[in-house]
Image: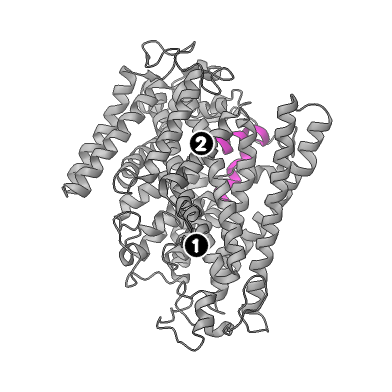
Amino acid sequence: MQVLWLVLLTLVTFTIGYVGYSRYLARFVDLDDDRETPAHKYRDGQEYVPSQRSVLLGHHYSSIAGGAPIAGPITAAAAFGWLPAILWIAVGNPLFGAVHDFMSLSSSMRHEGKSIGYIIGEYVGERGKDMLLWFAFLTIILVIAAFAFLIGSIFDAFPQAATASVLYIALAVVFGIYLYQLNLPFLPGAVVFVAAVFAGVWVGLEYPIALAAREGLPAGTIVLFGSALDWLPLAGAINPNVAAWILVTVLYAFAASVLPVWVLLQPRDFLTSSLLYTGVGGMLLAVIVGSIIGFTPVDVVVPAAGIDVTVSSLETQIAAFTGFVHPALGPIFPFLFVTIACGTISGFHSLVSSGTTAKQLNRESDARPIGYGAMLGEGLLAVTAVIAVSIIATSTGSLDAALVTFPAGGGALLTALGIPMLAAAAFIGLVFASFLLTSTDTAARLGRYMLEEIVGTPETSTQELAVNRYVSTGILAIGGYALVASGTWENIWPLFGGANQTLAALALLVATVWLANWSDNKQLISTGVPLVFMIGVTIVALLWIGVVRNPQTILAGEAGGTVAAASLALQSVVALVLVGLTLGLLYLGVTNVRNVRGDAGTAVADGGERTDGSRTARELRSREPGERRSREQTSEDEGSESSGSEPGDD
């Protein structure tokens, strides 16, 4: 089948979703530009910084669109065929994922830019808050570990992209100084610096760099440290260049996440967005142009991934559907929906939405294009990933090989626009690395926020040390590096997928509880239906991993050694812990919704355990959404009235 039809199907469903459904949701949550956003109310020049819509959209899009919307769809398409993958992206994204992101951003905006953990704590109590925050904190460590490995693999396979990435990070710092310290005009600076970033691709082609020597590096690659890094973890298992880039990535994430947002995060993400829009838009345009005008066959050779094929047409070279059960992954339900951990719906997005993005919204109406629209943009990235692997039709048995397939296939697509294959592949490699770098350091910053909210106001020297930005970020960086350096990185990915999708279900639970407590007139279908589906998916998937797949592998002696067997056993334990946390939080949330919407007429906390001085549900819901006080404040001052006006209900 012509891949053009896959693109058109996605564009149609996404357009309907944005034009129709997102407009309804914006009215539903009563977006009002007359309200003061947290970025203005708590402006501190560090975390709370009002940002232009285009700049913040770039930050949000580049933060959420990491390696997962590429690796997941590629793996799913190879396992089950391109048809199930495309349908889940085209239909699930606007109905599930975009709703998840928009509601996470909107609820955080109405709760002073706080995380989803804080929000659930407002309605079900401290126990639910701590459970969700610890869940998110541990997920962040998995994100750092997984993405650091992916970046190392890309920089190793495409040294040209490594050079270009280093240059664009340096340009971002200079751009931040230009905008926020020198207060120079935005538009001329944007033109100059965006052009400089694209010029960095040419520099990368001329001067590719590697940190350590290995066999098979492209001719002309500048090796900075030779064989001096052979002692690094993974140097022997994979190669020293990948091992070195992993360490550099973790150190970069640490440094970038402790800096004020204006120094690197905001300017870099704007520059990154220019790459992302060009890369994703260029590949989609290339599909259209190549399908209508004609496609010239091109040889695709990437030794690092074992790719040496000729792409002769823009038609799918893999089966539309391969069966309901894959021998390695398992049944299509639930593993199609867990494997495509991003591109359709992702719990990590709720951390970005309620972590950095909600603290930078300039106006409430910006939540619609940023929250809902950026998720559709990630869906388009996922579609290009499926197309890239479908036209190459090469082996994607390992994660790093699958990821390298994306720049190779994307480069082949861009040749339809007259761009040479080597330059096109290097550019898509830079685009891919930009996604990964942004997501990695944003994850580290979000993890710091999580730990700060867990500790709250520090009362001891230990707590003060824990919330120190350098210490908390160091914990995340060391934890992530330890996981990936252990050599069990391939086992991290399915665990990350399960944790990520479970977090998505919990974020939908938070949104449903918020709406239920806001007003009796708020329907709960938009968040409730995706919530029920994702809860079912994640529980079945985690139980399959923890109770069926891993124990069978261990008992059959197919684990590959004692260390691998121990790793699989630990994964089983973690999977079961995740199930327990999910069911516990689900109980707390459902109990709260039943109490505020049921006949009892009483808002309760901690899963139905009524607290002293609790108000009636109607009194609590009469407040402005997101301005409910804590249970402790309510107990101390039961008779006080809210000054917030009640928003209009749809």
Q: Residue at x 81, y 35 (%)?
A: 552
Asked if 350 appears above or below 406 in the picture, the reply is below
- Left/right placement of residue 194 relative to residue 396 reads left
Asked if 533 appears above or below 156 in the picture, the reply is below
Pinpoint residue 459: horizontal percent, then vertical percent.
Answer: 48, 61
SS at mark 2 in the image: helix
Query: Does the image show residue 70?
Result: no
What's the mark number on residue 358?
A: none
What is the chief secondary structure element of the magenta stretch? Answer: helix
Label whose residue precedes the other's in the sequence (2 or 1): 1
- Left/right placement of residue 190 relative to residue 410 reads left
Of the pair 301 and 392, the residue shown nearer to us? 301
Mark 1 neighbour density, 10 Å: few (under 14) some (14–19) many (20 or more): many
State the CA–CA distance, disc 2 to disc 1: 26 Å
**In which image quadrant can residue 390 be found?**
top right
Residue occupied by mark 2: 147
Q: Residue furthest right?
A: 555
- Left/right placement of residue 241 relative to residue 36 reads right
Pinpoint residue 383: horizontal percent, then vertical percent.
Answer: 52, 40
SS at mark 1 in the image: helix
Which residues fall within the magenta stretch? 70-92
Mark 2 neighbour density, 10 Å: few (under 14) some (14–19) many (20 or more): many
Q: Is-magenta flag for residue 80? A: yes
Amino acid type at image mark 2: Phe
Pinpoint residue 379: horizontal percent, then vertical percent.
Answer: 50, 45
**In which image quadrant can residue 355 be found?**
bottom left
Of the pair 448 and 175, the residue shown nearer to us? 448
Of the pair 164 and 279, the residue shown nearer to us? 164
Q: Is-magenta flag for residue 506? A: no
Residue occupied by mark 1: 103
